[in-house]
Structure formats: structure tokens, C-alpha cells
Image (cartoon, rainbow, N blue to C red):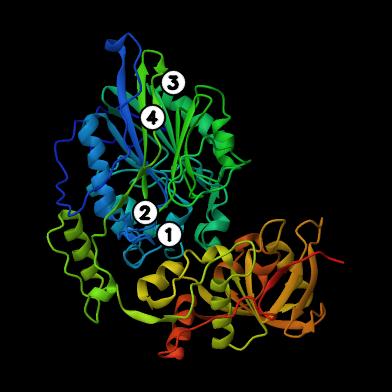
Amino acid sequence: MGNLEALEDGRPRVVPLASRTSTLLLILAFGLGLACGGPGAAPESEDALRHLTVLATNDFHGAFHEERLDDGSAVGGAAALAAAIEGVRGEVGRDRVLLVDGGDLFQGTPLVNATRGLASVELFGKLGYDAVAVGNHEFDYRGPVGDLQGPLKAAAAAAAFPFLTGNTVDAASGKAFEAPGIRRTVLLERGGIRIGLMGLTTATTPTTTHPKNVTNLRFEPVHEVAIELAAELRSAGAEVVIALAHVTGSCEEGRTPGIPDPPRCTLLPSELKQLVMLPEGTLDVVVAGHQNQWIHHRYGSTYVLEQGFNGRALGRLDLVVGPDGVDLAASKVHPPIDVKHAPREPLCGDLGPEGSTKRGEFGPIDEWLGAREAEVSLGRCKRVGCLARPLQRSRESQSGAGTLVAESLLEAWPADVALQNAGGLRTDLPAGPVRAPDLFRFLPFENTVVRMDLTGAQLRRILQTGTDAKAARIQIAGMSYGWDPERKGDRLCWVRVGDEPLDVERRYTVLMNDYMASGGLDLPGIARIPVEEGPRLRDVVRDAFHAAGAACLDPLVPSPIQTAFRTACP
């Protein structure tokens, strides 16, 4: 890394960066196709032009290992991502490359959670990242009272790059949330171009991390803060201003699996749309994250890059900068570079009973990963149980994955009803053996189970909040309900607990995770209700697999007792 100076008096200090001389040596036993084109055609005054290639990732979530695809190939993995990055650096020159991330390095795999984010920080340092946004899941690891963000601060202090968030402030004082390694902005130089970077963190963070983890913070509107910070960076000499923005934002056309190349992305109302609608000259580039979209488009004079998730792709933007700033006609945004390759890591069936891996001569990234996993004693291939069929997630109706979790809660702890937020289920589960990392990716959060008593009226209000015209955000067991997506106001048609209609006066014993009980999903009035705390949610589901022994679990979906039905209310 070059020298990144801390802000002084709220103003960034310009510090030219020395060009990097170290090279990441990778010995890869596979071919990696890079969908990289050259920079766009430049105007005639070539001597006055400078070139910058922006490489971007987002929502990495500790995805150190490749994922196998149905066609037999693999995607992602730390070494493959490193090779993609080095391929572009070799093409355009290291001093012309800016490598950044749109946030959520943390949360999602055993290694990143065991190290409370440090493993992702170490990898990104080895890959030579210049800066990253603070995402909502950077707040997932809770520190002690008085230092709730302690784990994030520790990881940032150890990083070779800054974590950026310009709109996060202390709720009591209104002062910027800053600490060693955590800043609002930074100004650096690449290829003779002065680049101003700001970080923006979604205002929805209090409901998309554990609410108790950020009670001392406030998240200001991102578009208002972006205007302020862009002006500061421009006045400090920035020729290009880039927002690393972990924000809401999705395409009207939907999200296509894999790495598509859609002709357009019409942004729905969101924080991202607010950013691209700012006055011309505010932001040149937004490197986005949070909603795992595939966006590589220009909106007016602002380019947007968002590359899915888990290091499956690498965004690339070739900027041409002249005396008057970014030359839109000469610059070029590329489709994401697909980090797809021939499999390198052995399947668990090829390993010994404890899942020991012989990595071979795959290079320094693999050596670092193997050593780091050995330090925290991760058995990557330890068998947890078996599934009779694939279990998929859904946020539109009850799913097999949701039924597995909700039924496991009811089996573990006496209650009338169990609820699980659909957003807490982070991946599908395949049929066949389920191993420890599979379960961890499925339920990565350290949520615990809580039990509380609710009236039927309160339970009905929860269901009303959890359903809208498109979504059933709450997965259930022990009950059923129907809702009409076209109905205005109260969309619920009917609710049953067991075989009986819901009694709004009766008190029911309800299980849910502590995220929901603390105010996640904005469930009405729940955060003030006394609860009885229980075991970790992931352990409850693991015990359900263990209880089945050699048999494969087969949650029944649909079921008359555990299903949310779309219907037309009479």
C-alpha cells in the first residue's frame, strides 16, 4: 500500500503514493478466462490524457474457498480472485489500477467468523486493496458494553487499507464514527490521477445487523452526506470522486443468476438511485454493495459497479481522465469478469474422515489459507447430517429451508409457534450429506433462540408486518396463514395455530431468534417483551440432524400446518 494519511480537521490530506513493487506470486493449476477488453478509444489529445482502471468487489463474506457449480466447474475462491486481479494489473500496469470493495467483508463462513473478520482483512491486504466500505455486516460481531464496535475497530486497525464510512455518527454526540483504520474519506493517487474516495453505509443497518450492536450509532442519509464529502474531496484536489457505497438498490429487471450482461438496469427507488441522481459532477463512480446485484452501467455521468457476491466476479471500469475530468466518451465499463475456473480444491469425498486437505503447490494464498484454518481448527468436511431432497430458500412463500429451521426449533423447545426470518437463511442446502461448512453458510449469524409469550393479536401483527404484496419474510412452524398480495391494508385472510383459528385474546408461546426479538424486521412492539434465552440457532438445527442419525431429514413442504398460502381473501 501507499501512504494513506488520516484526515486532519475533517479535511483529507493529499499524499502521493509510491508505486507498488511487490508482486503476488501465484502458481495456479488451472486456466482462468478473463473477460477483459482494452480501454475505450481515446480522444486526439492523447498527451493530456491519463488512464485509471478501477477493479471492484463487494459482499465477499469470507468466501475463501471456491464453490462447485452444477456443470462441474468452480467459481470464486481466494486464489482465483487473486489471479483475476493480477491478470488485469499485468495488462494495464499496477500503477494504473485502483482496487476497492463495496463492503461486507465479514460474516458468512467459519474462518471469517472465528477470527471476527481478521481473516478477510488479512486476505484483502495480501491482494493489495486500496480501500473498502463499511457494510452492515461489519457490525455483526458485538463488543462489550462501552465498546460495541470493538471487533470492527480491531480488524480495521490491523488492516493495510482504510475502512470508509462517511455517514455513520455517534448517536449521542453527532461526531463521525472514526477510529484507527476507520475514516470518512481518503485521497490517494494512481497513474498521476488524484482520486477521492468516500464510504457510505446503508441507513437500514440498524435492522440489517443485530439491532443491539449499533444502539450507540446513527446512520445519516447517504445522498446528503455524499454531496458534502464530494465537495470536500474536490476542494482538496480530487479529479475523480468515487463512493464506496454499501446501500440499498436493485434493478427493475430483476437479478439474473450467474454473471449476466443485461442491456440496462433500471434502478428502483433506493439509496443507490438517490446517489446516481445527484447533481452532475458530484460522483464519478459508485462501487456498490449490499443487494448482490449485477450492475455495470452509467447513469448520466456516474458509473455504477456491483458484482454479485462472494468473490464470484470482478468489476472493471477503465476511466480516461483529461484536464476537465472523466472523459465519458473515451471511458469504458466492462461486464464483470467471471471468476469461474476448473476445480482446484478436492471434494470432501476425496478426503479422509476428518476432512484433512492436501493442498499441494498452489501458491502463497493457499498456504496462508491452510495455515489460518489450522490455527482455528476448522474441520471443513465434518459431516453434520443428511437431507433427502434439496432445500431452497424463498422470501415469497414458505420454503423447505425455512421449514427445516422452524420445525427444528419446535422440536428442541416446547412452544406453540416458531418463527424464522427468511433473510437469515443465506444459502440453499443440497440433497445428500450436509457438512459443517454447509450448515455454517446456511446459518452464518450467531443468533440465539428466545422464547416469549405473545397474545394472538400481537402474533397477527407480526404476520402483517412480515407480509406484503410480494414477500412472506417470516418462515413458520406450528401454524399456517393465508394472505392476498392484491389486498390493500391487512393482507391476511386467515390464521391458524395448529388446527384451531387464531384467538386474538389467547396467549401463545412463541420461539424466534434474538435478531427478530430485538427489533429486526421492525416487528411491532417485540423488542420490549421479556424473553427466555436459549441455545444458538445453528446448534439447534445441527442437533436436529444429529437426532436423525443415519436417516436423511425430509421437511415436508407444502404442509397444511407449516405453510404460508397465497390466496384470494373472500
Q: Earlier in the sequence, mark 1 or mark 4?
A: 1
Q: Secondary structure at mark 4?
A: strand
Foreground label between 4 and 3: 3
| Residue located at (71% from left, 58% from top) | 468
Kind of residue at badge 2: Lys
| Residue 228 picture location, percent across and down | 51, 30
Residue ID for mark 4: 196
* C-alpha gap between disc 3 and disc 2: 38 Å
Query: Is label 1 in contact with label 2 (beta carbons under 8 Å)?
Result: yes
Residue ID for mark 1: 147
Kind of residue at badge 1: Asp
Residue 153 badge = 2
| Residue located at (26% from left, 51% from top) | 80
Residue ID for mark 3: 328
Quadrant in the picture for the C terminus: bottom right
Q: Earlier in the sequence, mark 3 or mark 1?
A: 1
* C-alpha gap between disc 1 and disc 4: 30 Å
Q: Earlier in the sequence, mark 4 or mark 2?
A: 2
Q: Earlier in the sequence, mark 3 or mark 2?
A: 2
Residues packed near mark 2 inside 10 Å, few (<14), some (14 to 19) or many (20 plus) = many
| Residue located at (42% from left, 62% from top) | 141
